Image (spheres, rainbow, N blue to C red):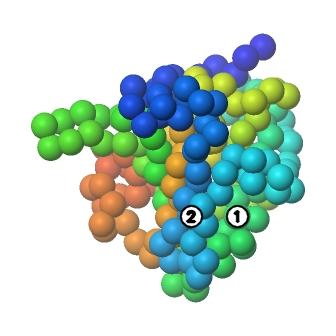
Amino acid sequence: QPQRPNGVTAPDDDVYKGLLANNFADWRLEVSGLVEKPLSLSREQLQNMPSRTQITRHDCVEGWSCIAKWTGTPLSLVLDQAMVKPQARYVMFHCLDTIDRSLSGDIKYYGSIDLVDARHPQTILAYGLNGKPLPVENGAPLRVRVERQLGYKMPKYLYKIELVDGFATVGGGRGGYWEDNGYDWYGGI
């Protein structure tokens, strides 16, 4: 049975549509901010790193849940490769899906977790779902799985990870799109 999609199920973004048209061959995951070694990783490079497969339950803030098998690269391995600086406290996730449109510009989905959750063994950058490549409606080419938190803390359509020491300069300054709109920063289950 397919994993129930949540949020945006097909980004209406020209950059995303172009990446999808060539099966994400040109997509890169950028890792920047408070790191010694900024990274630009292809999907193939991520898939060639050690992976983890886990069967876990997705809990949505809307009250539904479902169980699925996720495969991906542990986020901790990517952070280790980037050599996180000591002053970094949070991991910001920047995504390709437009979540809000306004006259001042489109707002792309973004979110964050602390380094404790980022380094948890079950926190992965998922590229597989139920033994197949991650489908578009579930976040292809890459989404975050943070199994200790609710679904809004697991961004889809990921293209950039940024290590920061605070949120003041990002969005509304609360650490994520939904947090800027009243949700708790920690969405623990």
**Residue nearest the observer in this picture, 22 or 117:** 22
Q: How many labels does the image show?
A: 2
Q: What element carries label 2?
A: strand
Q: Is residue 16 at all visible to an observer of this figure?
A: yes
Q: Residue furthest top?
A: 1
Q: Mark 2 points at which residue?
A: 31
Task: Assess disc 2: are there few (<14), some (14-19) or many (≥20) residues with their C-alpha within 10 Å of its C-alpha.
Answer: many
Q: In this view, does 35 lie above or below 41?
A: below
Q: Is residue 22 above or below residue 122?
A: above
In the displayed structure image, the side of residue 5 where residue 165 appears, left or right = left
Residue 175 placed where, x, y %?
40, 58
Q: Which residue lies furthest to the left in this view?
A: 103
Give me the residue at 37% from left, 42% from top.
Answer: 108
**In which quadrant will I find the N terminus?**
top right
Label 2 and label 1: CA atoms lie apart by: 8 Å
Q: Mark 1 points at which residue?
A: 78
Q: Is mark 1 on a helix, strand or loop?
A: helix
Quarter of image, res 39: bottom right
Residue 70 placed where, x, y %?
78, 37
In the displayed structure image, the side of residue 67 where residue 109 appears, left or right = left
Dot placed on the residue nearer the N-terminal end, 2 or 1:
2
Give me the residue at 73% from left, 17% from top.
Answer: 2
Type of amino acid at the residue the image marks with label 2: Val
Quarter of image, res 20: top right
Tell me whether circle 2 and circle 1 mark residues in contact (CB < 8 Å). yes
Type of amino acid at the residue the image marks with label 1: Val
In the displayed structure image, the side of residue 171 where residue 68 appears, left or right = right
Residue 96 placed where, x, y %?
45, 40
